[in-house]
Amino acid sequence: MPQMAPMNWLFLYLFFSMMFILFNFMNFYIFLIKKNNLTIKFMPMKSMNWKW
């Protein structure tokens, strides 16, 4: 494309592939942190089961 900056197509492919992989890793670890926070938050309620 003549109006585009002189970048290599291989560089663009690698750049967008790395951005996609990084976004997926970030999404995965954010989901893990939210899931762990929920389990830590509700842990004391599970230990409050008193047997009289």
Image (cartoon, rainbow, N blue to C red):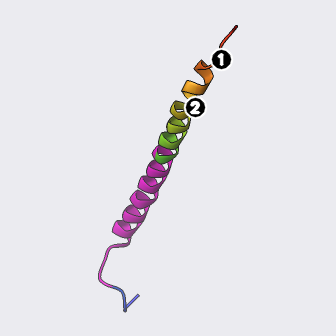
Q: Which residue is mark 2?
A: 42
- Looking at the picture, does residue 8 appear above or below residue 31? below
Q: In the figure, residue 52 lies in which quadrant?
A: top right
Residue at the image point whose x is 46% and y is 44% from the top: 29
Q: CA distance from mark 1 to mark 2?
A: 13 Å
Which amino acid type corresponds to the residue marked 2 in the rendered image? Phe
The quadrant where residue 5 appears: bottom left
Crowding at mark 1 (Cα within 10 Å: few <14, some 14-19, many 20+): few
> Residue at coordinates 42% horizontally, 65% vertically from top-left?
16
Between 8 and 21, the one nearer to me in the picture: 21
Q: Position of residue 40 (x, y in %)?
A: 51, 31
Q: Residue at x 50, y 40 (%)?
A: 32
Question: Which element is circle 2 on?
Answer: helix
Say if 15 sits above or below 27 in the image: below
Q: Quadrant of the N terminus?
A: bottom left
Helix, strand or loop at label 1? It is loop
- Magenta region, residue range: 5-29
Badge 1 is on which residue?
Answer: 49
Identify residue type, mark 1. Answer: Asn
In the image, is 40 to the left or to the right of 3? Answer: right
Q: Is residue 48 left or right of residue 4?
A: right
Residue 51 lies left or right of residue 38; in this view the side is: right
- Please state the horizontal and vertical placement of residue 24, each as a whole percent of the image: 49, 52
Q: How many marks?
A: 2
Could you say which is closer to the camera, residue 47 or residue 12?
47
